[in-house]
Amino acid sequence: MTEKYVVRTDEKITNPMSREEAIKMVKDYDKQGISAYIVSEDEGERLKNSKFNVPKWE
């Protein structure tokens, strides 16, 4: 079984892809000035289903 990865940005989480594709995508995001991270497919699913509360600064 081949390990799959997803790329996470502040805006979205991608569909699962190979390691090479994920690295290329992160480099492309970096060129655009967007922070992106590679995480495992399992971790990506966990992040999609979490209900993170964004702090509201006053």
Image (spheres, grey):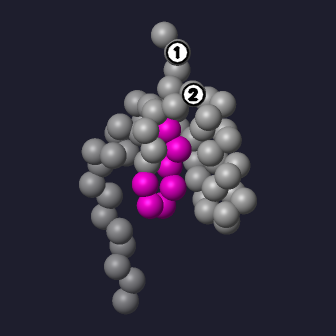
At mark 2, the secondary structure is loop
Q: Tell which of 41 and 14 is nearer to you.
A: 14
Which residue is at 43% across, 54% downward? 12
Determine the image quadrant of residue 15.
top left
| Residue ranking furthest to the top | 1
Which residue is at 66% across, 31% downward? 20
Q: Position of residue 47 (x, y in %)?
A: 37, 45
Where are the magenta residues, as a range? Answer: 6-12
Horizontal relation, residue 12 to residue 30: left or right: left
| Residue ranking furthest to the bottom | 58
Which residue is at 44% across, 61% downward? 11
The reply to whether callout 2 and callout 1 are in contact (CB within 8 Å) is yes
Q: Which residue in the protein does label 1 denote?
A: 2
Q: Which residue in the protein does label 2 denote?
A: 18
Identify the mark nearer the N-term, 2 or 1. Answer: 1
Q: Is residue 35 magenta?
A: no
Q: Tell which of 31 and 51 is nearer to you.
A: 31
